[in-house]
Amino acid sequence: MTDLPKSFQVDPFYQQSISNVPSSSKSLRDILNLYPFYYDITEEQTYWVEPNHYIIQELLDWWEEEEPKLKAYYQERDTKKARTLIITMSAVFIDLLFWINHQKVPGLIEIDFKIEELPYKPVNCNERIHYVISSPSQYHAYIQLNALFNEIKKIYARKRVLEDK
């Protein structure tokens, strides 16, 4: 078990009462679904050092699979299911954003300031992700997160082209 750093004990991802994150041998999705930012906390895998294109694509594909479900939850006004899924996918987006920038997520306290310093990010990313995290039950949070994923996918593709030159 790994102690959960105070910098990650931020609502809505972790409640203050959780103190540690158990080691796990499950799939990437299972781990991140149960324990957001698991790899940033434990450093069991350092996907941000040399971003593995397979892992980045895995996270993008995960969003593509979950986005229709999330949209349906909001259309059905099932805010409980929508809230749970959007929180998970917000954490996936934050991991994706930092890993593309060759950085681990340093913590969630004042995350908007940390996002501001990243070179590869969507426009107004810090304000938009802050809105998603603070209002996960709102339909507009889904709209913002969907747009953020679409933009980061394009940014990542552009970054790969530049790196391959």
Image (cartoon, rainbow, N blue to C red):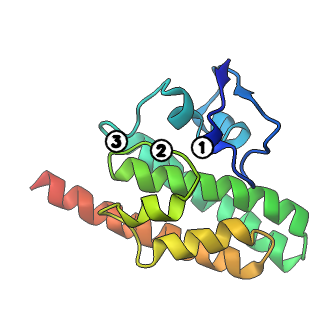
* Distance of label 3 from label 2 (alpha carbons): 16 Å
Secondary element under disc 1, as helix, strand or loop, is helix
Viewer-proximal residue among 29 and 87: 87
Residue 41, horizontal then vertical, whole percent: 55, 33
Viewer-proximal residue among 16 and 68: 16
- Residue 50 can be seen, yes or no: yes
Residue type, numbered disc 3: Pro
- Residue 51 circle label: 3
Check disc 1 and report the residue beneath it: 7
Residue 4, horizontal then vertical, whole percent: 66, 31
Vertical arrangement, residue 43 with respect to residue 92, above or below: above
Occupied quadrant, residue 90: bottom right
**Which of the marked residues, 1 or 2, is nearer the chain's N terminus?**
1
Occupied quadrant, residue 158: bottom left
Q: Residues within 10 Å of mark 1 (few under 14, many from 20)?
A: few
Contact check, label 1 and label 2, Cβ < 8 Å: yes
* Distance of label 3 from label 1 (alpha carbons): 23 Å
Report whether 119 appears left or right of 4: left
Q: Residues within 10 Å of mark 3 (few under 14, many from 20)?
A: some
Residue type, numbered disc 1: Ser
Secondary element under disc 3, as helix, strand or loop, is loop
* Distance of label 1 from label 2 (alpha carbons): 8 Å
Secondary element under disc 2, as helix, strand or loop, is loop
Residue 3, horizontal then vertical, whole percent: 66, 25
Check disc 2 and report the residue beneath it: 106
Residue type, numbered disc 2: Pro
Residue 63, horizontal then vertical, whole percent: 59, 58
Q: Which quadrant does the N terminus fall into?
A: top right
**Which of the marked residues, 3 or 2, is nearer the chain's N terminus?**
3
